[in-house]
């Protein structure tokens, strides 16, 4: 499967201003919720008194009793809520509890699914969001086992970026296919992560406060693939056990997340964005492999082929939406199947934030002399330095007809695999 490989770069960047989420210490407002006293003891949250609330911070106790349950549909259609915190006192969460929370950006949970140790589809992260579509939701197919039939479909807010997991065990496939998430925090109580728990994710930041998990990060695909998309990890300063894999990473340095101190470990400073993660228009098409929203791959290996219909009258482009942590100069690297008759300036018009960028020196996109052509033979080409601004950037590669007549359909036949940036900023893909 193609994956977004955003690799953390400079370890000296000040990140205090970055909007990351930490649930600890958030004040609860008991009066925001309605409750029912359960026969077996404890209270269940049954609803909210203000559907326009922006923060849903559930208290651990109410009237001297623990809050132990969230009812089905309790927070349904709280469309203004950007943050939700469910404390570890809660032992069960009903289906659809957060359905329709289309503005939700950060969430703290004590387990995934209905309850700790829930089975099959009830163990998945999407369970609490439900199986009915709503405005602002992404249709996510999550898997809970190895069989092709072991999956279910849920609708999770596209706005959701940060999750804090405060429980003990993350089950098989729990966060699978949640590509909208940009960061996850693994709390200090977590002791195990199931296989495929993070398959198909695009994390830019991974925070680990658990000694057990820090010790088990034996490679990119350890701990359910936690680091498979980002070969970097932030380890809490309180963590005393660390795997050899993490310790052997190329660089490390101090890192701060919402006032909490971490050490970040990283391998290099390249950020890779797969071609299928761009917004495709015109004659572009993907190769083998299923793709999802905006061309994001959902399985198998894939690539993009460029085709310029009707020459100059056509419109064929790949657009990447990229967030940068600061104003920066980045070196742009392009990977494609090489051809002997094209160069970059004749094949592409490069536009960044509406400004056309013309590389000072054109780049020949041909194979070395005498080397036979193979469409699967990807080659990295150094194109030019570009300027990115702090915040969101629109990076567009528009295919041009390479001098062909305007009435002639033209395929550049480049078989684009990915673009890559070398920079000291932190780059993430804007979903």
Image (cartoon, rainbow, N blue to C red):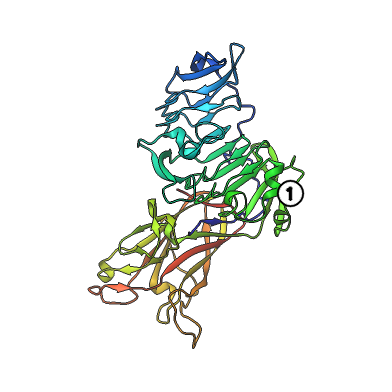
Q: In this view of the protein, which residue sits in the foreground, 77 or 391?
A: 77
Vertical order, 95 against 32 (above or below) = below
Residue at the image point whose x is 49% and y is 63% from the top:
419
**View extreme (right): residue:** 240
- Residue that label 1 marks: 242
- Residue 57: image location, x then y, percent: 55, 25
The residue sitting at the top extreme is 63
Please tell me which residue lies in front, 214 or 318: 214
Q: Position of residue 126 (x, y in %)?
A: 46, 38
Secondary structure beneath label 1 = loop
Q: Residue furthest bottom?
A: 370
Viewer-closest of 137 and 80: 137
Q: Residue 360, image x and y in percent?
A: 49, 72
Residue 386 falls left or right of residue 233: left
Q: In the figure, 115 relative to 41: above or below?
A: below
Q: Is residue 179 left or right of residue 23?
A: left
Few, some or many residues within 10 Å of mark 1 (<14, 14–19, 20+): some
Above/below status of 187 relative to 299: above
Q: Is residue 354 visible?
A: yes
Q: How many marks can you see?
A: 1
* Residue at image location 54% in from the left, 46% down from the top: 197
Q: Quadrant of residue 60?
A: top right
Q: Is residue 407 left or right of residue 346?
A: left
Nearest to the observer: residue 201 or residue 258: 201
Examine the rendering and report whether any part of residue 395 can be seen. Answer: no
Residue under the point 30% across and 64% down: 283
Q: Position of residue 136 (x, y in %)?
A: 38, 38
């Amino acid at each position: 499967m193609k994956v977004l490989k955003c690799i953390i770069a400079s370890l000296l960047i000040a990140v205090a201003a970055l909007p990351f989420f930490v649930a600890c210490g958030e004040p609860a407002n008991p009066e925001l919720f309605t409750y029912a006293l359960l026969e077996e003891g404890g209270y269940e949250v049954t609803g909210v008194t203000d559907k326009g609330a922006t923060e849903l911070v559930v208290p651990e106790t109410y009237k001297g009793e623990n809050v132990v349950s969230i009812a089905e549909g309790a927070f349904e259609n709280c469309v203004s809520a950007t943050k939700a915190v469910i404390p570890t006192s809660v032992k069960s969460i009903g289906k659809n509890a957060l359905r329709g929370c289309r503005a939700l950006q950060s969430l703290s949970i004590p387990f995934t699914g209905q309850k700790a140790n829930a089975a099959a589809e009830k163990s998945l992260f999407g369970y609490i969001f439900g199986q009915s579509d709503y405005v602002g939701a992404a249709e996510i197919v999550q898997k809970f086992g190895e069989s092709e039939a072991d999956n279910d479909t849920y609708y999770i807010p596209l706005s959701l970026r940060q999750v804090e997991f405060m429980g003990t065990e993350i089950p098989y496939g729990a966060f699978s296919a949640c590509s909208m998430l940009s960061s996850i925090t693994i709390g200090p109580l977590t002791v195990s992560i199931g296989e495929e728990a993070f398959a198909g994710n695009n994390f830019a930041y991974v925070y680990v406060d658990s000694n057990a998990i820090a010790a088990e990060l034996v490679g990119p695909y350890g701990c359910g693939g936690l680091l498979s998309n980002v070969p970097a990890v932030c380890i809490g300063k309180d963590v005393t056990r660390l795997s050899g894999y993490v310790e052997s990473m190329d660089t490390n340095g101090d890192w701060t997340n919402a006032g909490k101190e971490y050490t970040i470990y990283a391998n290099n400073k390249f950020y890779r964005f797969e071609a299928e993660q761009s917004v495709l228009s015109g004659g572009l098409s993907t190769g083998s492999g299923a793709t999802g929203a905006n061309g994001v791959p959902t399985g198998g290996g894939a690539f993009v082929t460029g085709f310029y219909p009707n020459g100059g009258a056509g419109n064929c482009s790949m657009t990447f939406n990229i967030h940068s942590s600061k104003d920066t100069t980045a070196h742009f690297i392009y990977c494609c199947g090489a051809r002997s008759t094209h160069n970059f300036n004749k094949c592409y018009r490069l536009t960044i934030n509406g400004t056309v960028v013309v590389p000072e020196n054109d780049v020949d996109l041909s194979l070395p002399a005498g080397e036979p052509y193979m469409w699967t033979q990807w080659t990295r080409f150094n194109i030019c330095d570009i300027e990115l601004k702090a915040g969101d950037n629109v990076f567009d590669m528009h295919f041009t007809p390479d001098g062909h007549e305007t009435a002639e359909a033209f395929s550049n036949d480049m078989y684009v695999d990915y673009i890559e940036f070398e920079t000291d900023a932190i780059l993430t893909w804007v979903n």
